[in-house]
Amino acid sequence: MKSAGRIFAMVLRYVYLLRRSWPRLLELIYWPAVQLILWGFISKFFVEHSSWLAQASGVLMAAVLLWDVLFRAHLGVSLAFFEEMYSRNLGHLFVSPLRVTELTGALLVISFLRTLIGIGGAALLAIPLYQFSIFGLGLPLLGFFANLLVMGWSIGLLVAGMVLRYGLGAESFAWVSIFAIAPLSGIYYPVSTLPEWLQPVSWMLPSSYVFEGMRQLMFEQVVRSDLLWQAVGLNLVYLAAGAGFFLLAFHSARRNGLLLRVGE
């Protein structure tokens, strides 16, 4: 009975944590909802276009690999920054002559390297396993890769700024933010599959232009340079916004003495 009482006390503690934290409650609903929305749109598209897969073999694998570029680029920035926060190393770093712009540059470089290693290995593995080579997309692949990489950087810097501003309690945004845009990016289906009221939101994401361009290339062997340039324009705006927010959050943290107390 005493053991049961202690278990009940700990359960009650965790219930109080949930009750007092709306992000934790929202997260419980968020993940099942995202999975339902994403796979619901995929199923809808397959039902309406039964011959789609026969038209372009490997298009799903191409979509998976390109989506992973965005995913890894984002995590390459945010997780590298989180490691400095976990070890409480930010204060030590900025006792040195290191500038925040130099730290930002280092985060982007390590994100690029981690993405290149991860995606390169998966792309090479797909050749013997599935007889599919994403390198067959040719030069447009560089445009797809660069756009998704920069978009991932933008989200990563935004999340790093939020964590710097609000503490490690906001680190779940690293996962929430990236998966929130997955159903809207048209990764496995065209943007036209989305409800009409959601399509303008989708076209505000650079990733939507990239995946539409990928399908045009694989289905019709047409390079849509207009889509790539629209993605570039949006990425410039988002990268400037992400970097600006991160720099503002950093200067605010340094002014308020949070760099030495980060995570508290």
Image: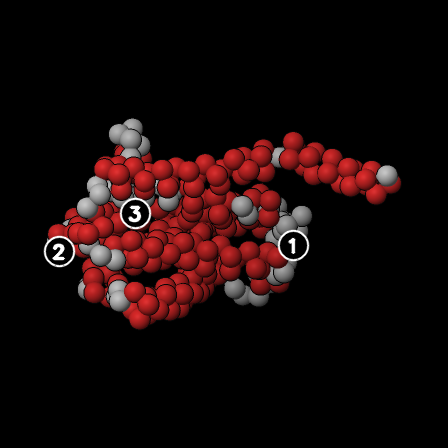
Where is residue 55 drawn, in percent x and y? 17, 52
Q: Foreground mark, 1 or 3?
A: 3
**N-term mark: 1 or 3:** 3
Tell me the SS state at disc 1: loop
Q: Tell me the quarter of the picture where residue 114 sits.
A: bottom left
Q: Is residue 181 above or below residue 19?
A: below
Q: Which residue is mark 3?
A: 188
Q: Residue at coordinates 81% horizontally, 40% vertically from top-left?
A: 4
Q: Is residue 48 above or below residue 234?
A: above
Q: Is residue 3 above or below residue 76?
A: above
Q: Residue at coordinates 77% horizontally, 37% vertically from top-left?
A: 8
Q: Which residue is mark 2?
A: 221
How far is the residue under mark 1 from the one under mark 3? 44 Å
Where is residue 85 drawn, in percent x and y? 59, 56
Query: Mark 1 and 3 residues: CB-CB less than 8 Å, in contact?
Result: no
> Dot 3, how many residues are within 10 Å of its Cα: few (below 14), some (14-19), or many (20+)?
many
Tell me the SS state at disc 2: loop
Q: Residue at coordinates 86% horizontally, 39% vertically from top-left?
A: 1
How far is the residue under mark 2 from the one under mark 3? 18 Å
Q: Tell me the quarter of the picture where residue 241 sits.
A: top left
